[in-house]
Amino acid sequence: MDGFLFFSLLMFLSLFLPLIAFVLLIALNLIEKEFDYLQLENKRVHLEKQLHQMEYMQLSQQIKPHFLFNSLNAMTSLARLERNEDLIRAMERFSLFLRYQNKGKESLVLFETELEHTRNYLYIQSMRYGKKLEIQYNIDPKAENTLLPPYTLQTFVENAFKHGLDHKRGEKRLDIQLRRHGDWVILKVLDNGEPRLITSNSGTGLDNIRKRLQLVFEMYTEVTITRKEHVSEVKAIWPYTPKGVD
């Protein structure tokens, strides 16, 4: 009886061991392929991030010349009017402006830093237009510690002067608003400048900001421009990202 059991066990092993070994080989092969796939996927994601970063930095560099050109134009106007003291103060602000422009920055900066830099640009414009220019700030304390791509606010402000306020006679008004709505931040720059052509992209500067927001954030973002009741409004929406999250 024991011999029969031993013989049966031997027959069972001889029949099924090759099958078991075959299944194990297939499983090991699948595991190896899965590992290779994960390695390829990680390389793809890493390469994609590098390409996004390169594209992002290229977009950031495209913005700088616009601000430099408009700042130089503003100071040229002061020189022509022989407002030397105003010109000196404007040049001091301009040097701070250049320092920020040429300082290495991450993909996101604090809004407070962005606002301070924009104030340097606006100081030069205030020297140029004097009492004709009125600037208002409406900043929500719950939103001011958010992060955003550098040059976002500057681009909106530059756009307001270049396409609207520079062409308007009389009183010029600029309103900068920032507020938080739940998990989102809404930035608006309004001006009473001359009407401008409203398109889906509305110029290189705004389209640049739109692309950079899309590259940085993986959630919903928006950049729009509208004209209503003699006021142009440029608006950006992005996820609220407090300081320390980059």
Image (tube, helix red, strand yellow):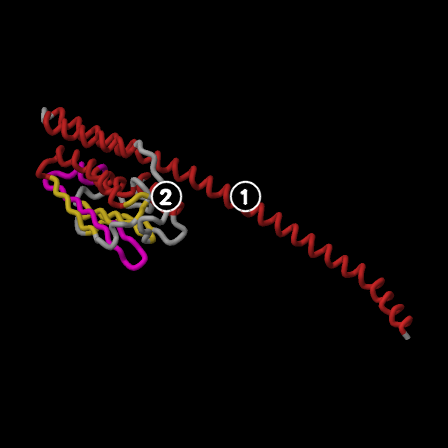
Q: Amino acid at mark 2?
A: Arg
The reply to whether the magenta stretch includes residue 107 is: no
- Disc 1 is placed on an element classified as helix
Nearest to the observer: residue 153 or residue 194: 153
Residue 134 location (% of width, % of height): 12, 43
**Hey, which residue is sitting farthest front in the picture?**
2
Q: Is residue 182 magenta?
A: yes
Residue found at the far left of this picture:
131
Three-letter amino acid code at the position of disc 1: Lys
Magenta stretch in the rendered image: 162-187
Residue 176 percent coordinates (x, y): 20, 47
Q: Position of residue 237 (x, y in %)?
A: 31, 52
Numbered badge on residue 165: none
Q: Which residue is mark 1?
A: 43
Residue 184's place in the image compared with 213, above or below, is below
Q: Quarter of the image holding residue 60?
A: top left
Q: CA distance from mark 1 to mark 2?
A: 23 Å
Q: Residue at x 65, y 50 (%)?
A: 33
Q: Which mark is residue 212?
A: 2
Image coordinates for residue 169, horizontal then vertical, percent = 12, 38
- The residue under the point 24% across, 45% down is 112
Q: Residue 74: name its quadrant.
A: top left
Among numbered discs 1 and 2, the one appearing first in the sequence:
1
Q: Callout 1: few (<14), some (14-19), or many (20+) C-alpha neighbours within 10 Å?
A: few
Give the left or right position of residue 51, taking residue 11 as reference. Answer: left
Quarter containing the N terminus: bottom right
Instruction: Identify the image quadrant of residue 3.
Output: bottom right
Q: Is residue 245 above or below residue 100?
A: below
